[in-house]
Amino acid sequence: MTDAAQPHPHLSVARDGAVLTVTLDNPERRNAQTPSLWLALADLAVDLDPAVRVVVLRGAGPSFSAGLDRAMLAPGGVPGETDMIAMAAESAEGAAATIEAFQRGFSAWSEARAVVVAAVQGHAIGAGFQLALAADLRVVADDVQLAMRETSLGLVPDLGGTAPLVSLVGVARALEICATGRFVGAAEAVAIGLANVAVPVAALAATTDDLVAALLAAPEAALRELKPLLRSAVDADRETQLRLEREAQGRLLHAIAGPLGS
């Protein structure tokens, strides 16, 4: 049984058992993003039902997301949205404080207990690229065009994308990708670790479904322990990581063996 909802005018959510599919749903604008969308994404991630084991992030239409709605950067912005120009004009500190809430729409997915899979086709630019990077795994179509264009606008990526980008490709390549704003295609994305697999556009949905099925086939308790364990390995010192490994294993072994006397 599938349950559907629309927590934002440009966001559709469907639940099928242990799988939640979150779709950017404004194909006429290539799923351009706005602050209210980021806040809705944050609410979804923070309030995720513990029974959800896999989340799929996808975009309706030919593109995953063309990034920030450029109208946000014009005087007056977009009706009903945060006026980015007025916000920035007040103070740098105030702008940073406002952006903090927007970042949760991206960073909260890494903290979710579920494994998050991004199915990415066409353009994934700026905020679109950063949303794909917020996922744990990425399946890309062979027409994908990943790009960080913020620097070309006199800005920097600010929606949680810098840490996963550097973790995946290293500082030098991340700097080159961001500073030049160039497109990264499917073959290169797989070669440098930005994507797990690239497939023809027509096979994107089926390949994503196969990956989701494989994740669901893994023992649930082990997969729940595995995601935070591997994420902590990026920054934790050796002794901390060894402790986290043995504590996770202890919980799993205890659950398998059962308490004495049972």
Image (tube, grey):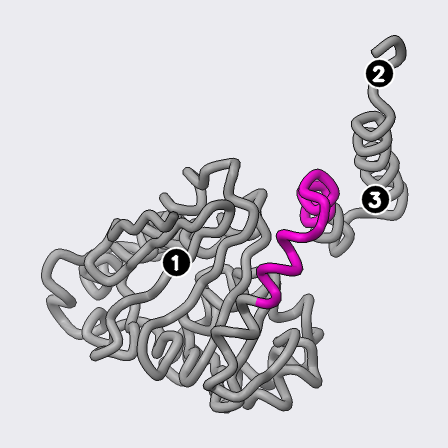
Q: Spatial distance from mark 2 to mark 1, Cα to Cα?
A: 39 Å
Residue type at numbered disc 3: Gln
> Looking at this view, is 196 or 37 the one in front?
196
Residue type at numbered disc 1: Val
In the image, taking residue 34 as reference, residue 102 lies left or right, namely right
Residue picked out by circle 2: 259
* Label disc, if present, on residue 22 of the rendered structure: 1
Labels 2 and 1: the sequence-earlier one: 1
> Looking at this view, is 244 or 256 the one in front?
256
Q: Quadrant of residue 60?
A: bottom left
Nearer the camera: disc 3 or disc 2: 2
**Residue drawn at x 51%, y 51% as measured from the top left:** 109
Q: Is 15 included in the stretch rendered in magenta? A: no
* Label disc, if present, on residue 241 of the rendered structure: 3
* Residue 245 on image: x %, y %: 84, 41
Does residue 146 sit above or below 5 in this rendering? below
- SS for dot 3: helix
> Looking at this view, is 96 or 192 the one in front?
192
Nearer the camera: disc 1 or disc 3: 1
